[in-house]
Image: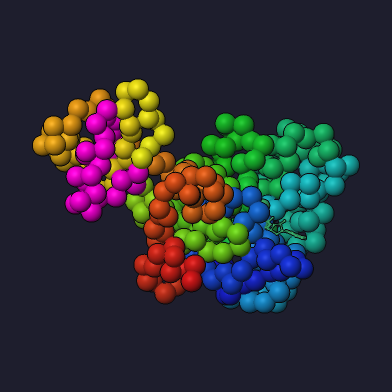
Amino acid sequence: MLIARELTKRYGPRTAVEELSVTVAPGRVTGFLGPNGAGKSTTMRMFVGLTRPTSGAALVNGRPYEDLAWPAREVGALLDVAAAHPGRTARAHLRAKAHVCGLPRNRVDEVLAEVGLSEVADRRSGSYSLGMRQRLGVADALLADPGVLLFDEPVNGLDLDGVRWMRDLTRRLADEGRTVLVSSHLMSEMGQVADHLVVVGRGRLIADAPISEVISAWSRTHVVLRSPDAGRLRARLAREGVRIETGTGGDSAGEELRVFGPGVEEVGDRAYEEGVRVHGLRLEQASLEQAYLELTGESVEYGARTAPVTAVRTGADGAGRTAEEVES
Ligand SMILES: Nc1ncnc2c1ncn2[C@@H]1O[C@H](COP(=O)(O)OP(=O)(O)O)[C@@H](O)[C@H]1O
Ligand SMILES: [Mg+2]
């Protein structure tokens, strides 16, 4: 179990992590999602005592890292791919750590096999590809068989097989009852691995909810309509209080409207009632990726064109609060 309690890290005037409160539960894969610079790595580093919080607490199994009796047996982390000395072999690197942790030597062979590095274990890690170094980092994290695992952007540099392997590994570790926190800056990737999502933007918590809830809260549909007489229909829908945006697709074929709320049939019927010619009518879904970028403040352009999306937050307080409420 990992608990962040009003966790804050400032670097001079810059706040990397701001009052982050979140509980990462065992038995499931928790995705830690946020754009580059959102504070994911800083948060993970605070959990393993590599970065000191400015205020608040980062607890592993209820204690700060430095109070853990056998830290490597409680928490393993893949944070920095370059963590192993390039002049050392993978086997030598893991043996040194096994020695420090008081683990039997055959444990090294076990984890090497587990991450698929047995064949190349006696090569210097400096000659490894990025993907192989990632695997070595995973072997290092797993070595002392900890119940809590932190993987920071683990699929960076992995090929398709590697990505699939990482996905299966995180699933298995969670199924074994471990606490598994996996970060990524890509929403698309999280959909494949995570059961639960913690989303951060600019150091702050944006959402903390099961992935299915995040998906349903972030998925919005609207009707896109193209018409040479769009003005009349727009006036009619506006009278009914329907939110409409004028799209970018206006040309000789007419204006494009984005209609939020009513479905395709309803919009088509209104057009018919008004005697408005329609040259295109379709349902459009904002992608999760778009919603995510908008929420995390990555894409100012998209954010300016549409209203903010409601984010769910069913965290420790259990209350479903919106993004704006979390913001204030
Ligand atoms: N050692 C550091 N010194 C100064 N600023 C830092 C340091 N580490 C991270 N930051 C800043 O903190 C913010 C969060 O960084 P980071 O935790 O690496 O984000 P993420 O992992 O989500 O990409 C960024 O603005 C980054 O520039
Ligand atoms: Mg990072």
Q: Horizontal placement of 15 versus 235: left or right? A: right
* 187 or 190: nearer the viewer: 187
Horizontal side, residue 112 vs residue 309: left or right: right
Q: Residue at x 36, y 47 (%)?
A: 219
Magenta stretch holds residue 73: no
The picture places residue 4, in percent across and down from the top left corner, at 58, 71
The image shows residue 59 at horizontal and vertical percentages of 61, 72
Say whether residue 100 is visible. Answer: yes
- Boundaries of the magenta span: 220-245
Where residue 170 appears, as percent x and y from the top left, is 54, 49
Q: What residue lies at 54% left-to-right and 48% top-to-bottom?
A: 300
Q: Is residue 318 left or right of residue 65?
A: left
Place of residue 7 in the rendered image (x, y in percent of width and height, measured from the top left) = 62, 72
Q: What residue sits 54% from the left and 53% below the top?
A: 297
Picture quadrant where residue 134 is located: top right
The residue lying toward the viewer, choosing from 191 and 199, is 199
State whether residue 257 is above or below residue 216.
above
Is residue 60 in view? Answer: no
Looking at the image, the residue that sits furthest to the left is 273
- The quarter of the rendering in which ligand 1 is drawn is bottom right
Query: Where 264 falls versus 62 (above or below)?
Result: above
The residue located at (25%, 42%) in the rendering is 234
| Closer-to-camera residue (192/101) | 192
Q: Residue pushed farthest top? A: 252
Quadrant (top left, top right, bottom left, bottom right) of the N terminus:
bottom right
Identify the image quadrant of residue 67: bottom right
Compared with 122, 215 (above or below) is below
